[in-house]
Image (cartoon, rainbow, N blue to C red):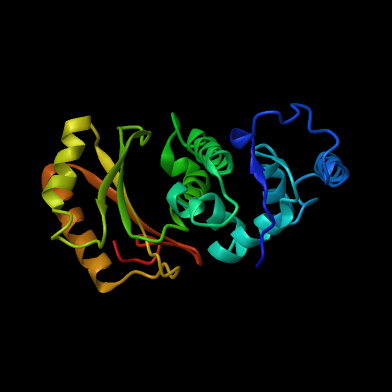
Amino acid sequence: MQVPQTRDVGDRLPGDPKNSAGHAGTGHRQRLRQRLLDGGAEALADYELLEFLLFAAIRQGDTKPLAKALIAHFGSFAAVLTADPQALRQVKGMGHASVAALHANALAARRMARGAVQNRPVLGSWQALLDYLNIDMAHLTHERVRGLYLDTRNRLILDHLLSEGSIDEAAIHPREVIRKAFDVGATALILVHNHPSGNPEPSRADITITARITEAGRLLGVTVHDHVIIGREGNVSLRAKGLL
């Protein structure tokens, strides 16, 4: 896709007018803004919402081709917002300001989702927890393993990165996972990891390491409530499948 040249706010040239109200595309931007305000969540297509997010960084020019190029490159709107800034910079037309604008929106979405599970019992806010994990992990291109450490009321104490890479005992030692619980005063935990393939069905390695961590926890008085696997195609609870 041919992406026309656009200019980031941060790349303004000397002598450029500060007021860009008359630039080409102003009418389109105003119409898009009005549709967003009048129509609600589904008023804009994915590429149009991405266009709108790019307006904050790109002072002039048509952002529609860039928005469509980003979705084509990463595969979906969600994948664009969760993409690493370095990956965003590889797309022609993306400058520092536009990369920062998209990354800031992704961080805002994560913080909102995280806020829905903080300071409340995680087991009683299960869908909010899954929403948080899906936003954060479903579109990762590498495997990440996390431990959600909980207090006696099952409130989240610590969301801890255990490993970047495959989930096996070479990368994650069960006793180290449980020892972290003692370090932070946790009495329970939930294991979480993602499958970059998109399919969240557990592998034999997933089931084996879960059993070993659960047994280590039982011996040391730390409950493993669940192991949740996140993928683009959904999520799977090992406890719900009777595997824990």
Q: Residue at point 55% right, 50% down?
A: 81
Numbered circles on residues, count = 0
Q: Residue at point 60% right, 36% down?
A: 11
Residue 216 in the image, given as x and y percentages of width and height: 13, 51
Instruction: Quadrant for residue 97, please give it.
Output: top right
Q: Nearer the viewer, residue 162 or 153?
A: 162
Instruction: Quadrant for residue 179, please give it.
Output: top left
Q: Residue at point 36% right, 36% down?
A: 154
Residue 125 in the image, given as x and y percentages of width and height: 49, 42
Q: Nearer the viewer, residue 6 or 239?
A: 6
Task: Name the quarter where the N terminus is drawn.
Answer: bottom right
Residue 62 in the image, given as x and y percentages of width and height: 75, 51
Residue 183 in the image, given as x and y percentages of width and height: 17, 32
* Residue 75 visible in this rendered orientation of the protein: no
| Residue projecting furthest to the bottom | 204
Q: Residue at point 27% right, 65% down?
A: 206
Instruction: Quadrant for residue 140, please give it.
Output: bottom left
| Residue projecting furthest to the front | 15
Task: Name the quarter where the C terminus is drawn.
Answer: bottom left
Q: Nearer the viewer, residue 124 or 44?
A: 44
Above or below, 3 against 146 in this view is: below
Q: Nearer the viewer, residue 145 or 34?
A: 34
Residue 229 as seen in the image, left or right of residue 15: left
Residue 176 as seen in the image, left or right of residue 244: left
Above or below, 26 against 46 in this view is: above
Above or below, 83 against 153 in this view is: below
* Residue 37 visible in this rendered orientation of the protein: yes
